[in-house]
Amino acid sequence: MATTSASLLERLKVAPPGASDWGRLNGIYLPLIRHWVGRAGLASEADDLAQEVLVAVFKGLAGFDRRADGSFRAWLRVVTVNKVRSYRRVVRREEQDAEGFLDRLADPASGLSAEWDRDHDRHVFDRVMSIVRPDFSAPTWEAFRRTAIEGQPVAVVATAVGITENAVMRAKCRVLQRLREETTGLLD
């Protein structure tokens, strides 16, 4: 099993960051950003704008401080809104509906902002689960999935998977620890 000593965001701040870490951030966030750019009325430009957002994130990440800037999720939302607004000004596409959407998305207290947060967390969790899944054996992953995600009792899972109850609890803890390592700073 591969382990990480620092969160993805912290590793990306180190010079020079590893290409695999940049690829991981891109793999996690590109689909999410593309989705929200499309919701802002720019579906045909979503691929290019999502890349621009990630470039801005890559450039600004060294200066990102969660204590000063808030959560990474909130910072990413602001970067996305600013890139979409900037693009709209350049191409003179400032439809009223789209601006209202961007205003609501930019407002941390809005329902749309809360929707971004939920969508972000669900998306990141799903992507990180798919990233760490290959690092665990089938019985370990199955024990984790059944107990942590489906909420099945440990004894039932132990019987179904063919391992001891102690092994089920250890499997759940190992996978959860790995997920915490990979999501530190991303879901805070």
Image (spheres, helix red, strand yellow):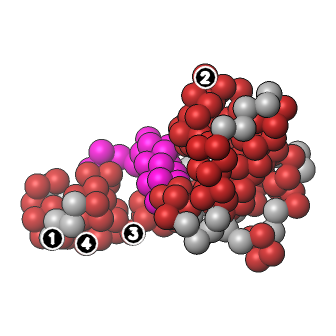
Q: Amino acid at mark 2?
A: Ser
- Using a 10 Å C-alpha cutoff, classify the residue at mark 3 as few (fewer than 14 neighbours), some (14 to 19) or many (20 or more): some
Looking at the rendering, the stretch of residues picked out in magenta corresponds to 118-139
Q: Which mark is residue 44?
A: 2
- Using a 10 Å C-alpha cutoff, classify the residue at mark 2 as few (fewer than 14 neighbours), some (14 to 19) or many (20 or more): few
**Residue placed most toward the observer, 188 or 87:** 87
Residue at horizontal 60 percent and vertical 58 percent from the top: 104
Q: Could you say where residue 3 lies in the image, as x and y percent from the top left? A: 58, 55
Q: Secondary structure at mark 3?
A: helix
Q: Which mark is residue 173?
A: 3
The CA span between labels 2 and 1 is 47 Å
Q: Which mark is residue 40?
A: none
Figure quadrant of residue 16: top right
- In the picture shown, does residue 71 fall above or below 47? below
Q: Could you say where residue 188 lies in the image, as x and y percent from the top left? A: 59, 69
Q: Amino acid at mark 3?
A: Cys
Q: Could you say where residue 134 lies in the image, as x and y percent from the top left? A: 44, 41
Q: Secondary structure at mark 4?
A: helix
Q: Amino acid at mark 4?
A: Asn
**Residue placed most toward the observer, 100 or 3:** 100
